[in-house]
Image: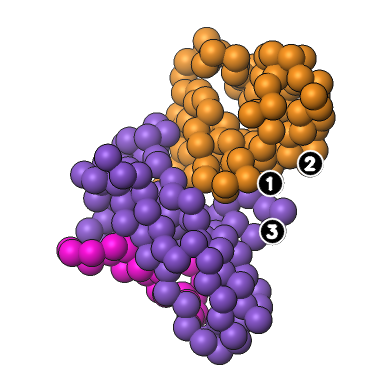
Chain colours: A orange, B purple
Protein backbone atom coordinates (compact mmCIF):
# COMPACT_ATOMS: atom_id res chain seq x y z
CA UNK A 1 0.00 0.00 0.00
CA UNK A 2 1.10 3.52 -0.70
CA UNK A 3 1.80 5.87 2.19
CA UNK A 4 2.48 9.59 2.31
CA UNK A 5 4.27 11.12 5.29
CA UNK A 6 4.43 14.77 6.24
CA UNK A 7 6.69 15.08 9.26
CA UNK A 8 5.98 18.75 10.01
CA UNK A 9 2.59 19.27 11.69
CA UNK A 10 3.15 23.02 11.70
CA UNK A 11 5.52 25.50 10.09
CA UNK A 12 5.86 29.23 10.58
CA UNK A 13 7.52 31.74 8.26
CA UNK A 14 7.85 35.50 8.09
CA UNK A 15 6.03 37.25 5.30
CA UNK A 16 8.21 37.57 2.17
CA UNK A 17 10.54 34.79 3.33
CA UNK A 18 10.91 31.30 1.84
CA UNK A 19 9.62 28.12 3.45
CA UNK A 20 9.98 24.45 2.53
CA UNK A 21 7.42 21.81 3.43
CA UNK A 22 8.59 18.19 3.53
CA UNK A 23 6.91 15.10 2.15
CA UNK A 24 8.06 11.52 1.72
CA UNK A 25 6.13 8.64 0.22
CA UNK A 26 6.39 4.93 -0.20
CA UNK A 27 5.34 3.04 -3.31
CA UNK A 28 6.33 0.10 -5.46
CA UNK A 29 4.93 1.74 -8.59
CA UNK A 30 7.26 3.23 -11.17
CA UNK A 31 4.75 5.55 -12.80
CA UNK A 32 2.75 7.89 -10.61
CA UNK A 33 1.86 11.51 -9.89
CA UNK A 34 2.52 13.64 -6.84
CA UNK A 35 0.59 16.71 -5.78
CA UNK A 36 0.52 19.48 -3.24
CA UNK A 37 -2.94 20.71 -2.23
CA UNK A 38 -3.78 23.80 -0.21
CA UNK A 39 -6.74 23.81 2.17
CA UNK A 40 -7.55 27.32 3.43
CA UNK A 41 -10.05 27.93 6.25
CA UNK A 42 -12.86 27.70 3.68
CA UNK A 43 -11.85 23.99 3.58
CA UNK A 44 -11.91 23.68 -0.20
CA UNK A 45 -8.99 21.65 -1.56
CA UNK A 46 -7.03 23.63 -4.13
CA UNK A 47 -4.37 22.04 -6.32
CA UNK A 48 -1.12 23.98 -5.96
CA UNK A 49 1.32 21.98 -8.05
CA UNK A 50 1.80 18.51 -9.50
CA UNK A 51 4.77 16.39 -10.56
CA UNK A 52 4.84 13.44 -12.94
CA UNK A 53 7.25 10.78 -11.70
CA UNK A 54 8.74 10.09 -15.11
CA UNK A 55 9.78 13.73 -15.48
CA UNK A 56 13.13 14.59 -13.92
CA UNK A 57 12.57 18.33 -14.11
CA UNK A 58 11.06 19.82 -10.98
CA UNK A 59 7.64 21.43 -11.43
CA UNK A 60 7.27 25.17 -10.87
CA UNK A 61 4.16 27.36 -10.60
CA UNK A 62 4.97 31.01 -9.96
CA UNK A 63 6.17 31.23 -6.32
CA UNK A 64 5.69 27.49 -5.76
CA UNK A 65 8.26 24.89 -6.73
CA UNK A 66 9.04 21.34 -5.78
CA UNK A 67 12.20 19.36 -5.11
CA UNK A 68 11.41 15.88 -6.41
CA UNK A 69 13.93 13.20 -5.47
CA UNK A 70 12.58 9.97 -6.96
CA UNK A 71 15.24 7.65 -5.57
CA UNK A 72 14.75 9.06 -2.08
CA UNK A 73 10.96 9.18 -2.56
CA UNK A 74 10.94 12.76 -1.41
CA UNK A 75 8.72 15.57 -2.69
CA UNK A 76 9.14 18.88 -0.87
CA UNK A 77 7.31 22.12 -1.62
CA UNK A 78 9.11 25.46 -1.60
CA UNK A 79 7.10 28.66 -1.27
CA UNK A 80 9.06 31.78 -2.13
CA UNK A 81 8.13 35.33 -1.09
CA UNK A 82 5.49 34.03 1.33
CA UNK A 83 2.26 36.00 1.45
CA UNK A 84 -0.44 36.20 4.10
CA UNK A 85 -2.82 34.46 1.71
CA UNK A 86 -0.55 31.41 1.70
CA UNK A 87 -1.60 30.58 5.25
CA UNK A 88 -3.42 27.24 5.11
CA UNK A 89 -3.08 23.50 5.59
CA UNK A 90 -0.91 21.95 2.90
CA UNK A 91 -1.37 18.33 1.93
CA UNK A 92 1.01 16.20 -0.07
CA UNK A 93 -0.78 13.56 -2.16
CA UNK A 94 0.09 10.62 -4.38
CA UNK A 95 -1.76 8.69 -7.06
CA UNK A 96 -0.41 5.71 -8.91
CA UNK A 97 -2.86 2.91 -8.62
CA UNK A 98 -6.56 2.31 -8.46
CA UNK A 99 -7.30 3.64 -4.99
CA UNK A 100 -7.65 7.34 -5.66
CA UNK A 101 -5.45 9.95 -4.07
CA UNK A 102 -3.47 9.07 -0.94
CA UNK A 103 -2.95 12.13 1.27
CA UNK A 104 -0.47 12.94 4.03
CA UNK A 105 -1.73 14.30 7.34
CA UNK A 106 -0.94 17.86 6.39
CA UNK A 107 1.25 20.74 7.48
CA UNK A 108 -0.30 23.85 8.98
CA UNK A 109 1.52 26.85 7.50
CA UNK A 110 1.48 30.07 9.51
CA UNK A 111 2.60 33.33 7.92
CA UNK A 112 3.92 35.91 10.38
CA UNK A 113 3.30 39.51 9.21
CA UNK B 1 -19.57 27.49 -14.84
CA UNK B 2 -20.32 26.23 -11.34
CA UNK B 3 -17.77 24.07 -9.59
CA UNK B 4 -18.44 20.96 -7.57
CA UNK B 5 -21.43 21.63 -5.33
CA UNK B 6 -21.92 19.81 -2.07
CA UNK B 7 -24.85 20.08 0.30
CA UNK B 8 -25.54 20.42 3.03
CA UNK B 9 -22.40 22.24 4.14
CA UNK B 10 -23.15 21.34 7.73
CA UNK B 11 -25.29 18.49 9.02
CA UNK B 12 -26.01 17.55 12.61
CA UNK B 13 -27.41 14.14 13.43
CA UNK B 14 -28.08 12.18 16.60
CA UNK B 15 -26.67 8.71 17.02
CA UNK B 16 -28.75 6.17 15.12
CA UNK B 17 -30.09 8.61 12.54
CA UNK B 18 -29.30 8.61 8.85
CA UNK B 19 -27.11 11.13 7.05
CA UNK B 20 -27.36 11.89 3.34
CA UNK B 21 -24.71 13.99 1.65
CA UNK B 22 -25.13 15.19 -1.90
CA UNK B 23 -22.61 16.08 -4.54
CA UNK B 24 -23.24 17.64 -7.93
CA UNK B 25 -20.11 17.36 -10.09
CA UNK B 26 -18.85 20.02 -12.41
CA UNK B 27 -20.74 20.33 -15.65
CA UNK B 28 -19.55 17.69 -18.08
CA UNK B 29 -17.94 15.53 -15.40
CA UNK B 30 -19.18 11.97 -15.01
CA UNK B 31 -16.63 10.68 -12.48
CA UNK B 32 -17.13 11.31 -8.78
CA UNK B 33 -14.89 10.54 -5.83
CA UNK B 34 -15.79 10.73 -2.14
CA UNK B 35 -13.19 11.38 0.56
CA UNK B 36 -13.45 11.61 4.34
CA UNK B 37 -11.34 13.93 6.48
CA UNK B 38 -11.16 13.22 10.18
CA UNK B 39 -9.92 15.99 12.51
CA UNK B 40 -6.16 16.59 12.19
CA UNK B 41 -5.96 14.10 9.32
CA UNK B 42 -5.59 14.19 5.57
CA UNK B 43 -8.35 13.10 3.23
CA UNK B 44 -8.92 9.38 2.89
CA UNK B 45 -10.39 7.85 -0.25
CA UNK B 46 -13.76 6.20 0.17
CA UNK B 47 -15.37 5.46 -3.19
CA UNK B 48 -15.14 6.20 -6.89
CA UNK B 49 -18.27 6.24 -9.04
CA UNK B 50 -19.24 6.82 -12.62
CA UNK B 51 -22.79 7.40 -13.70
CA UNK B 52 -24.85 4.43 -12.40
CA UNK B 53 -21.73 2.43 -11.52
CA UNK B 54 -19.49 1.97 -8.51
CA UNK B 55 -15.98 1.56 -9.87
CA UNK B 56 -13.96 1.28 -6.67
CA UNK B 57 -15.33 1.16 -3.13
CA UNK B 58 -12.20 -0.15 -1.45
CA UNK B 59 -12.17 2.75 1.03
CA UNK B 60 -15.77 2.43 2.14
CA UNK B 61 -16.58 0.90 5.52
CA UNK B 62 -18.30 -2.42 4.98
CA UNK B 63 -21.38 -1.54 6.99
CA UNK B 64 -23.74 1.43 7.17
CA UNK B 65 -22.09 3.35 4.31
CA UNK B 66 -23.33 3.37 0.73
CA UNK B 67 -22.93 5.59 -2.31
CA UNK B 68 -24.71 6.03 -5.59
CA UNK B 69 -24.48 8.20 -8.67
CA UNK B 70 -27.74 7.87 -10.59
CA UNK B 71 -28.23 8.67 -14.23
CA UNK B 72 -30.03 11.86 -13.24
CA UNK B 73 -29.24 13.95 -10.19
CA UNK B 74 -26.37 14.25 -7.75
CA UNK B 75 -24.20 11.58 -6.22
CA UNK B 76 -25.37 10.58 -2.74
CA UNK B 77 -23.26 9.34 0.15
CA UNK B 78 -25.53 7.70 2.68
CA UNK B 79 -24.59 6.80 6.24
CA UNK B 80 -27.10 4.77 8.17
CA UNK B 81 -27.31 4.57 11.98
CA UNK B 82 -24.61 7.18 12.45
CA UNK B 83 -22.18 6.95 15.37
CA UNK B 84 -19.95 9.63 16.90
CA UNK B 85 -16.96 8.29 14.98
CA UNK B 86 -18.66 9.25 11.71
CA UNK B 87 -18.21 12.94 12.59
CA UNK B 88 -15.93 14.28 9.88
CA UNK B 89 -15.78 16.43 6.78
CA UNK B 90 -16.82 14.56 3.65
CA UNK B 91 -15.42 15.85 0.39
CA UNK B 92 -16.56 15.13 -3.12
CA UNK B 93 -14.38 15.58 -6.17
CA UNK B 94 -15.16 15.21 -9.84
CA UNK B 95 -13.27 14.72 -13.07
CA UNK B 96 -14.07 14.30 -16.75
CA UNK B 97 -12.43 10.87 -16.92
CA UNK B 98 -10.19 8.49 -14.96
CA UNK B 99 -7.01 9.58 -16.68
CA UNK B 100 -7.75 13.21 -15.94
CA UNK B 101 -8.24 12.36 -12.28
CA UNK B 102 -4.94 10.50 -12.19
CA UNK B 103 -3.09 13.49 -13.58
CA UNK B 104 -4.56 15.98 -11.15
CA UNK B 105 -7.56 17.25 -13.09
CA UNK B 106 -9.68 16.58 -10.05
CA UNK B 107 -11.90 19.34 -8.71
CA UNK B 108 -13.02 19.34 -5.10
CA UNK B 109 -16.16 20.68 -3.51
CA UNK B 110 -16.10 22.60 -0.25
CA UNK B 111 -17.08 19.58 1.77
CA UNK B 112 -19.94 18.62 4.05
CA UNK B 113 -19.25 18.64 7.76
CA UNK B 114 -21.16 15.96 9.64
CA UNK B 115 -21.47 16.23 13.40
CA UNK B 116 -22.97 13.33 15.30
CA UNK B 117 -24.25 14.16 18.77
Seen as rendered, the residue at the extreme front is A113
Query: Of B47 and A113, which appears nearest the observer?
Result: A113
Query: Marks 2 and 1: in contact by CB < 8 Å?
Result: yes
Which chain does tag 3 point to? Answer: B
Q: Residue at x 56, y 64 (%)?
A: B113
The x and y percentages for residue B25 are 31, 51
Residue that badge 2 annotates:
A9
Q: Which residues are magenta?
A: B60-80
Which chain does tag 2 point to? Answer: A
The x and y percentages for residue A8 are 79, 36
Residue that badge 1 annotates:
A105
Seen as rendered, the residue at the extreme top is A57
Q: Earlier in the sequence, mark 1 or mark 2?
A: 2
Q: Is residue B18 visible?
A: yes
Estimate the spatial distance between the alpha carbons at disc 2 and disc 3, rounded to whole Å: 13 Å
Residues flagged by tags 1 and 3 on a common chain = no
Seen as rendered, the residue at the extreme bottom is B16
Query: Marks 3 and 1: in contact by CB < 8 Å?
Result: no
Q: Residue at x 21, y 44 (%)?
A: B28
Query: Of A95 and A11, which appears nearest the observer?
Result: A11
Seen in the image, is A49 located left or right of residue B53? Answer: right
B32 to B116, vertically: above or below: above
Quadrant housing the C terminus of chain A: top right
| The quadrant where residue A89 appears | top right
Estimate the spatial distance between the alpha carbons at disc 1 and disc 2, rounded to whole Å: 8 Å
Q: Residue at x 40, y 42 (%)?
A: B107
For label 3, count other residues whose C-alpha is less than 10 Å away and answer few (under 14), some (14-19) or many (20+). Answer: few
Q: Is residue B97 visible?
A: no
Q: How many marks?
A: 3
For label 2, count other residues whose C-alpha is less than 10 Å away and answer few (under 14), some (14-19) or many (20+). Answer: some
Amino acid sequence: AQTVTQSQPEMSVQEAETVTLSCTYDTSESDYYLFWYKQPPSRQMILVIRQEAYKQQNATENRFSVNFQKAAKSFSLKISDSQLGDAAMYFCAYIGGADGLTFGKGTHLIIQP
Amino acid sequence: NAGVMQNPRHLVRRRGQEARLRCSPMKGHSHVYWYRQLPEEGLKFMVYLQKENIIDESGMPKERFSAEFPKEGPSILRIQQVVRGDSAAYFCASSSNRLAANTGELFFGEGSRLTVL
